[in-house]
Amino acid sequence: MRGFIKIGFLALVLLFSQNLAAQEQEEDVQENKSFLNYYSTELFQWSYDFWGGLYLNYQNQSSRTIFGLKESMQKPLALYDDSNQKFLSYKTKTLLGNIFFWSGYAVIFSSPFIMAYGNGDSDNYNSITMGALGSGLVFILVGSFLFTSGQENIFDAVNSYNKNKIAEYRN
């Protein structure tokens, strides 16, 4: 019977000691709560929608990254040198990617009109139509690669900004 009481007492001590060890100091709890508040107001967060693509969230604002960012999101990214360089690269690649992508679509959609203008009789118009289709496809591919590269740069810029902002928070 005594062994049973000792084992029961030891089990209770282990149970309560684990609970005590798991509790945090009050100052750590306050620091964690203030960091969560800081996280929701001062740092960028990502979200993804299947139809809309990547969204960037900052201070209760949301912006799609496909055509650029809102002005209120551009200013914080320009605060730090490394995030600014990546952000400027994102802007350039996104602009060029969109230009190539939509120009390729315009060229592809113009090719039936080229064929209709030639009335389908001339081999020259067939060659021009096929050239327009091919060049439009190449433009679309180049635009897609540039745009994807720009998305990588905005992701790097946001990560760099968040790292710098957390380093400021710790100091």
Image: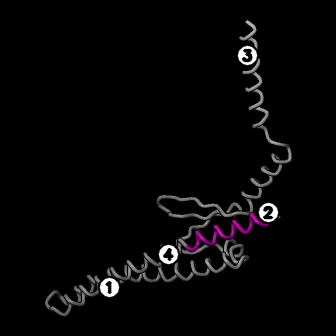
How many numbered marks does the figure carry? 4
Q: Residue 169 carries which label?
A: 2
Q: Earlier in the sequence, mark 2 or mark 3?
A: 3
Q: Where is residue 26 in the image (x, y as percent from the top left)?
A: 85, 43
Image marks 2 and 3: residues in contact by CB distance under 8 Å: no
Q: Nearer the viewer, residue 6 or 131?
A: 6
The Cα atoms of the two marked residues, 1 and 4, are separated by 21 Å
Q: Earlier in the sequence, mark 1 or mark 4?
A: 1
Mark 4 closeness class: few <14, some 14–19, many ≥20 residues within 10 Å: some
Q: Earlier in the sequence, mark 4 or mark 3?
A: 3
Q: Residue at x 50, y 75 (%)?
A: 149
Residue 11 image-quadrant placement: top right
From the viewer's perspective, is the residue at label 1 or at label 4 nearer?
4
Q: In this view, does 8 lie above or below 134?
A: above
**The C terminus, quarter of image:** bottom right
5 above or below 74? above
